[in-house]
């Protein structure tokens, strides 16, 4: 039993009042981007109504007010993940955060022959920056596989980590399989050889309690728009001692202490990594989003989504049996609220379009995880993803519609 009423929560999300093709909107694509509550929308609007200065750009009161607001947002977001404010860099999203790690840390610290260990379940955002580094620096990428049940193969991972490993880059929750990875176990193995651990938290931070001190990683990246906040704002948490050693990957105004014609002294972190006018409106919106999530309680959010996933797996099995194939761990406790599946004999996009005509928004395709889909021998999947505003009726609508699609596809 979760600690909030999702029917009351739904009242806070104006998008749920709209229809899709004349039907009640069943929004099951929160892994792509979440809906926004009124308080977030209002916070952004009131920022533009009431504030009118740039951050850290002047002595006048208006500028100082904006600076205070931006730094309050940093503190609030840091608190949400059990961190201190000065360990949190605002970025444009998880992708930007992961690029920051690769270019600020990787470019200067990796040498030819070093190895980066990844998993086959990584989103492209946690693959491509490392691929770029591999070609620039002669670094080798090693991919760790999954078990038949869609879990990370820890034995293979521990074997892949060696004295040559400098980075282990891993997703906390797979955006396809929903698998939750044991980051602490991975971090301990990586740290035992002196490697750093980069965690892609794009799917975990919005949906479960994440505390950076518990994870024991060195970096954690996530996006605001997947956790009730606006687009264009993201976060990179970084261990303080690691961050202090890093040079900025983007340079410009706001990130310096002093500049000479041929040299510059960069500001201490996190400002060192935030050159240019930042997305203050995004930070303000994200602050309101994490306040909202904290009020509801992340343990409750996780439990609610797990209940919906359990219910969906049960209904799919009862109503469709062999006509549906579900990917990822059978044990619902090993996964979050992401359910990827295929209807046997039917193309994933065809299923997605048929669901759309029933008012149900899901994602179809390879979900920026080509390596995983190829490993599974799949051309794509249909992905339903849940959040705190989803209810059992959404699951029933999905399974009923899939049942009809499967039947009409067979006749
Ligand atoms: N990592 C994972 C696991 C994701 O699911 C996503 C987005 O779908 C990203 C990274 C990239 O997030 P963004 O597009 O917000 O940068």
Image (tube, rainbow, N blue to C red):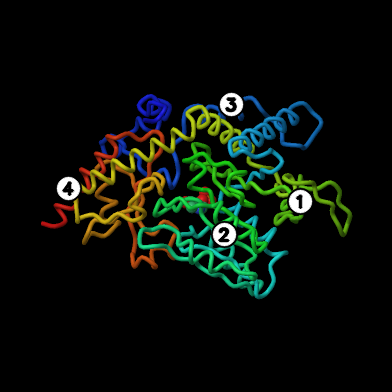
Task: Tell me which residue sits at (57%, 36%) in the image.
Answer: 286
- Looking at the picture, how far across and down is residue 81, in whole percent? 59, 39
Task: Give the number of the mark in front: 2 or 4.
Answer: 2
> How far across and how far down the image is residue 402, in percent?
22, 48
- Looking at this view, is 13 or 118 the one in front? 118
Q: Which of marks 1 and 3 is in front?
A: 1
Choose top left, top right, bottom left or bottom right for residue 391.
top left
Secondary structure state at the residue bearing disc 3: helix
Please state which of residues 370 and 154 is positioned toward the viewer in this rendering: 154
First-in-chain label (1 vs 3): 3
Q: Position of residue 270 (x, y in %)?
A: 72, 45
Tell me the quadrant of the picture where the N terminus can be found.
Answer: top left
- The answer to whether the residues at label 3 and label 4 have Cβ atoms under 8 Å apart is no
Q: Residue, x 71% and y 30% (percent of image)? A: 68
Q: Mark 4 points at which residue?
A: 404
Q: Which residue occupies the foreground of this view, 148 or 49?
A: 148
Specify which label sits upstream in the sequence, 3 or 2.
3
Q: How many marks?
A: 4
> Given contact means CB atoms under 8 Å apart, are the residues at marks 2 and 1 in contact?
no
For disc 4, does the CB lie below 8 Å from ligand 1?
no
**Of pointers 1 and 4, the one earlier in the residue sequence:** 1
Whole-angstrom CA distance, mark 2 to mark 4, is 41 Å
Q: How busy is the neighbourhood of tag 1: few (under 14 within 10 Å), some, or many (20 plus)? A: some
Q: Earlier in the sequence, mark 2 or mark 1?
A: 2
User: Neighbour class for label 4 at 10 Å: few (<14), some, many (≥20)?
Assistant: few
Q: Mark 3 points at which residue?
A: 46
CA–CA distance in space, label 2 to label 1: 20 Å
Q: Mark 1 points at which residue?
A: 244
| Precedes in sequence: disc 3 or disc 4 | 3
- Which mark's residue is nearer the viewer, 3 or 4? 4
């Amino acid at each position: 039993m979760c600690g909030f009423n999702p029917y009351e929560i739904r009242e806070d999300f104006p998008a749920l009042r709209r229809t899709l093709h004349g039907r009640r909107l069943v929004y099951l694509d929160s892994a792509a981007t979440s809906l926004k509550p009124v308080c977030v929308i209002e916070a952004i609007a009131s920022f533009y109504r009431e504030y009118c200065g740039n951050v850290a750009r002047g002595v006048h009161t208006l500028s100082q007010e904006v600076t205070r607001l931006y730094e309050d947002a940093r503190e609030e977001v840091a608190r949400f993940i059990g961190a201190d404010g000065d360990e949190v860099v605002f970025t444009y999203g998880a992708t930007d955060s992961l690029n920051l790690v690769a270019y600020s840390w990787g470019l200067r610290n990796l040498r030819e022959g070093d190895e980066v260990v990844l998993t086959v379940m990584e989103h492209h955002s946690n693959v491509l920056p490392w691929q770029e580094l591999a070609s620039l620096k002669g670094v080798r990428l090693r991919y760790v596989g999954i078990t038949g049940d869609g879990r990370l193969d820890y034995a293979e991972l521990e074997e892949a980590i060696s004295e040559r490993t400098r980075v282990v880059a891993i997703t906390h929750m797979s955006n396809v399989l929903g698998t939750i990875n044991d980051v602490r176990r991975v971090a301990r193995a990586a740290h035992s050889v002196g490697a750093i651990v980069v965690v892609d938290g794009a799917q975990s931070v919005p949906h479960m309690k994440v505390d950076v001190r518990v994870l024991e990683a060195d970096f954690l990246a996530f996006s605001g728009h997947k956790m009730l906040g606006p687009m264009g704002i993201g976060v990179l948490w970084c261990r303080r001692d690691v961050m202090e050693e890093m040079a900025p990957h983007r340079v410009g105004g706001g990130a310096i202490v002093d500049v000479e014609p041929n040299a510059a002294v960069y500001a201490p972190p996190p400002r060192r990594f935030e050159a240019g006018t930042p997305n203050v409106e995004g930070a303000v919106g994200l602050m309101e989003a994490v306040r909202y999530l904290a009020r509801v309680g992340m343990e409750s959010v996780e439990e609610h989504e797990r209940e919906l996933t359990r219910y969906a797996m049960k209904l799919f099995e009862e109503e469709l049996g062999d006509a549906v194939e579900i990917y990822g761990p059978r044990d619902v406790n090993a996964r979050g609220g992401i359910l990827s599946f295929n209807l046997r004999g039917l193309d994933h996009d065809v299923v997605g379009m048929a669901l759309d005509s029933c008012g149900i928004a899901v994602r179809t395709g390879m979900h920026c995880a080509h390596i995983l889909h190829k490993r599974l021998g799949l051309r794509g999947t249909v992905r339903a993803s849940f959040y705190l505003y989803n209810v059992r009726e959404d699951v029933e609508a999905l399974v009923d519609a899939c049942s009809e699609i499967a039947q009409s596809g067979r006749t």
